[in-house]
Amino acid sequence: MESNREPSKSDWNQLFSTPGYKILTSGEFNKQFFIDNFRLVFKPSNRKKLEESLKNKKYLHHLNHYIKVRDNKNLIKDQQKLLERNNFNNIAIDRTIEFLPQNNVYEYPPVSFLIFESNGRGSSPIIVDVAASIEWDFISFLSHEFHHWYRNRQLQFSYTDIAFEDQDIIKIFSMIEAEGIADMVDKKDWFTKPNSAISEYARGFIRDVGKTPAVIVSMDEVLNQIYKDPKQKKNLAKRLYYLLPQKGHTTGYFMASLILEKFSKSKLVMCVGNPFEFILLYNKAAKMSAGRYPSFSDESIKLISEFSSKYIIN
C-alpha cells in the first residue's frame, strides 16, 4: 500500500486468517474496519482523506496508532527481533502464578503479535500489538494477560449455563473479579512509586481507584433495585456497567487490595474464576474495616449469594 498498490483479495484473506486477526474479526472488529483504516494511513494517495478523518476524529485513536506504526517501521522490526530472541514466557509466568491457585503450569499461553491498537487482549491466543509493546512494560502486560488466560481455564461456573436474564450482570461481576485479581500482578508497584516515575495512564488508574468507595455505594443502590425488581435485571445491568471506571479494573483492584489486607493472598486466589466469592469476601473485609470502606447492603449480598448458589459448580 505504501507504493499505492491495492492488496489482492487473497492478501487480505491471508492477513485475516492469521490467529490474532481471526480472533479480532470474529466479533470485536469487522474486516472492513482494518481494510479502510490501513488504506487511509498507508496509501500516500489517501493523505488528504486521512487529514479529514483526523479532523473529524473518527477512529482517531486507531488512526494515530497506525500513523505511529507507519513512521516507525525500523523500531517495530527491532522489537520483532527482540521478541524472537528472548523467551519472555518464564519471567511472565513467575509473576502470574503468584496470583493463581496452582503452584506450576503445564502449558504456555499462545501469543499472537499484530497491529490493531495500543492494547492487547486476554483471548486465546493472547493478542499483543507489537508496536504498542515497545512503549509498555511488556513483561507486566504479558503477566496480566497470562493471568486471564489461566483464569479462564479454571472458571468455577459455566457461561453456557447462565440464564439469559442473568448474563449481563454476571459478566459485570466477572469483569470486576478477573481484572481486579489480574491487576494485582502488574499494577501494585504503581502505588509505591513517585508520581513522576509512572505513566499518565498509571496516574489515572490510581485516581480512579480512589473513587471506588463512591462507586461501590452506587453499585449497591443498583443491586438493591435488582433484588427488589428482578424483571429489571437487563436494564439495571446497563446502569451498573456504566458506573464502573475502566471496565471494572479499578473497582476490582480496590476490592482485591482490601481482601489482601484483611485476609491473605491464599484467600484471594481462591476467588480466581469465582466472581461471587470475590465480592462476598470483599464485603467481609469491608465489614472488618470499622466503616473505613463501604460494604454492600444485606439485599445486595442476598442477590449475589443467590447467584452463587445457582451457578457455582461444586
Image (spheres, rainbow, N blue to C red):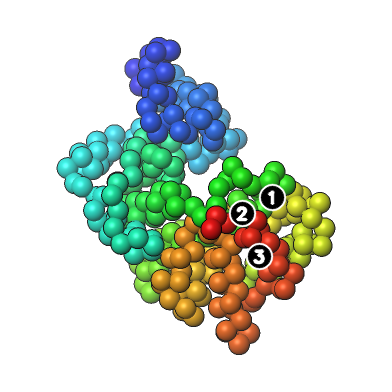
Which residue does the numbered mark 1 point to in the structure image? 166
Q: Where is residue 259 in the image (x, y as percent from the top left)?
A: 50, 74
Q: Distance between the residues labelled 2 and 1?
A: 10 Å
Residue at x-position 64% and y-position 60%: 309
Residue at x-position 49% and y-position 29%: 25
Q: How far apart are marks 3 and 2 (CA)?
A: 10 Å
Give the residue at the far front of this rendering: 314
In terms of depth relative to the viewer, which is nearer, 163 or 241? 163
In terms of depth relative to the viewer, which is nearer, 177 or 117? 177
Which residue does the numbered mark 3 point to in the structure image? 305
Relative vertical location of residue 274 with respect to residue 295 in this rendering, above or below: above
Q: Do the residues labelled 2 and 1 touch (CB within 8 Å)?
A: yes
Amino acid at dot 2: Tyr
Which residue does the numbered mark 2 point to in the structure image? 311
Tell me which numbered mark, 1 or 3, is placed earlier along the sequence: 1
Relative vertical location of residue 234 with respect to residue 24 in this rendering, above or below: below
- Mark 1 crowdedness (10 Å alpha carbons): few <14, some 14-19, many ≥20: some
Q: Which of marks 2 and 1 is in front?
A: 2
Q: Where is residue 40 in the image (x, y as percent from the top left)?
A: 47, 25
